[in-house]
Image (tube, rainbow, N blue to C red):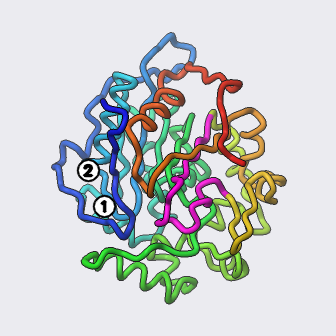
Amino acid sequence: MTTNKMTFLYKLPVFLTLASTLGSALANPTNSKPISSNPDDEDDTPLPVVIWHGLGDTFSADGLQSVGALVEKVNPGTLVYYVRLDESPSNDRTATFYGNVTEQIAKVCDDLAAHPILSTAPAIDAIGFSQGGQFLRGYIERCNFPPVRSLVTFGSQHNGIVDYKACSAADWLCKGAMALLHGNTWSSWVQSRLVPAQYFRDPMDLDSYLEYSNFLADINNEREIKNETYAKNIAKLENFVMYIFENDTTVIPKETGWFEEVNGTEITPLRARQLYSEDWIGLRALDRKGGLQFKTTPGEHMRISDDILEESIGEFFGPFKKAVPKDDQESDEL
């Protein structure tokens, strides 16, 4: 594999195209080797990897399947599970725009807990692309069975968005969703039905966000009453690796991928925020044990080189007992 080969998962949303439908075989994991549920067993089987795609994509897309192939290449024998909200690729794509995120995460919790192999594994690893990253974090905070060992997110909106770049001219599904986002963000109808609105967060209007947000204000524990389970579950992770794209103009602001607060030209790093100092969701506890990683990758949103993917898969995924030397890990956060 050449060093300049790129995995183009999807191009959000100005670059959106309909993914090809590959059939039911691609909707299901192709590797079903059992995983020991006893952490003490001398088992070198890699932990399963769960992948959640982003806005405008589908579980059967070629780009997503190529990521699964890289996981298998780096750690042979890995069971790869692609999160889907519907067995129809077309309906799964629609669900990235329209649906109640709380209900969607509850469905994924149920699906993973009922899976005959995932549910018996000592843990799983997870990759979240774009909005799939904060949705996997919601899974960890709210249910986390099977438990996630390491979470890697690419270009995710952990601290919300203030806008999205314009949709492509022919993508009416995207255009309809964005029109609702800009016009009626805080209505109960939009907050329960439009997916991007449920992680919309404007630092200039936090009162509305805290009162009406259906999803992000809850999983970020920003309201007065905190959910202690959320912090405990995040703190239990071995690694939480957050990549942002250096030239991302799709996610606004791109720094949301590192939980940074961007208010106009003022940027507040995560470690200077109250969310961190009071440890609302367990990030400080995770950071103190060396498990919080800030990383960058070149290029626009979701343009990820195979080298970056293979590096992250090799470093953070693999057998249950695999140890990651914390002293060797570097953070790109300033």
Q: Nearer the viewer, residue 188 or 57?
A: 57
- Residue position for label 2: 60
Q: Residue at x 25, y 46 (%)?
A: 27
Figure quadrant of residue 240: top right
Q: Which residues are magenta?
A: 239-259
Residue contact between numbered discs 2 and 1, judged by CB atoms under 8 Å: yes
In the image, is residue 250 part of the stretch drawn in magenta?
yes
Q: In front: mark 2 or mark 1?
A: 2
User: Circle 1 — which element?
Assistant: helix
Q: Residues within 10 Å of mark 1 (few under 14, many from 20)?
A: many
Quadrant (top left/top right/bottom left/bottom right) for the N terminus: top left
Q: Can residue 303 be seen?
A: yes
Tally of numbered tags? 2
User: Circle 2 — which element?
Assistant: loop
For badge 1, the amino acid type reads Asp
Q: Nearer the viewer, residue 243 or 35?
A: 243
Q: Position of residue 307 (x, y in %)?
A: 42, 34
Image check: 107 left or right of 91?
right
Tell me: residue 229, above or below residue 181: above
Tell me: residue 17, above or below residue 138: below
In the image, is residue 155 part of the stretch drawn in magenta?
no
Figure quadrant of residue 112: top left
Q: Position of residue 133 (x, y in %)?
A: 51, 52
- The label on residue 158 is none
Q: Residue at x 74, y 69 (%)?
A: 266
N-term-proximal mark, 2 vs 1: 2
Tell me: residue 284, above or below residue 275: above
Q: Nearer the viewer, residue 103 or 193?
A: 193
Q: Can residue 120 be seen?
A: no
Q: Residue at x 47, y 27 (%)?
A: 314
Figure quadrant of residue 293: top right
- The label on residue 92 is 1
